[in-house]
Amino acid sequence: MEVIIAPKPTIMIYHHPNVSVETIQDLLFGIEEEGIPYSLEARAASDDILLMADEASHASALSVGVGCSADTLVLSYKNLPPHQFIYRLRNYKQAKQTMRALGVNAARLVKGNPFKTDPGLEVAF
């Protein structure tokens, strides 16, 4: 009898190889404070951060993905068109509280709770 172990449901975070965990620590703290697990995966550098976030959402069992380039974070959901996003944060290294709010909102998307507002987050709709 073959045993298949399903991967743990997590928010998937795809990041460029040059982005360290320390750089996005506030994003991770935001997800953790809402009690949702996440997985990090380094991906080949790409100029299309929206596509990276979309691929992360499709790889997530929770249907929520974050794309992380050297200067931009994008929150996406599996059921959105590939070049659509929920939130985007440019120059995130200078906006630690806003980065944390994006992490909170990623977790709240999973839980179905209202989003946390932050003027630094670019909203797509």
Image: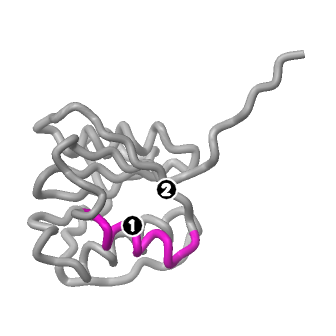
Quarter occupied by residue 23: bottom left
Counting from the top left corner in percent of width and height, residue 6 is at 69, 36
Name the residue nearer the viewer: 4 or 79: 4
- Extent of the magenta region: 24-35
Identify the residue at image location x=27%, y=46%.
15
Please tell me whether mark 2 sits on a helix, a strand or a loop.
Answer: strand
Marks 2 and 1: in contact by CB < 8 Å? Answer: yes
Quarter occupied by residue 104: bottom left
Type of amino acid under label 2: Tyr
Identify the residue at image location x=43%, y=45%.
57
N-terminal label among 1 and 2: 1
Instruction: Please count the marks in the image.
Output: 2
Residue reaching furthest right? 1
Please tell me whether mark 1 sits on a helix, a strand or a loop.
Answer: helix
Magenta segment, prevailing SS (helix, strand or loop) = helix
Residue 28 numbered tag: 1
Identify the residue at image location x=16%, y=39%.
48
Residue that numbered label 2 is attached to:
38
Name the residue nearer the viewer: 58 or 34: 34
Identify the residue at image location x=15%, y=34%.
46
Residue 110 numbered tag: none
Gap between marks 1 and 2 measured at Cα: 8 Å
- Residue 25 belongs to the span the image colors magenta: yes
Residue reaching furthest top? 1
Name the residue nearer the viewer: 72 or 20: 20
Above or below, comparing residue 52 to residue 3 in the picture: below
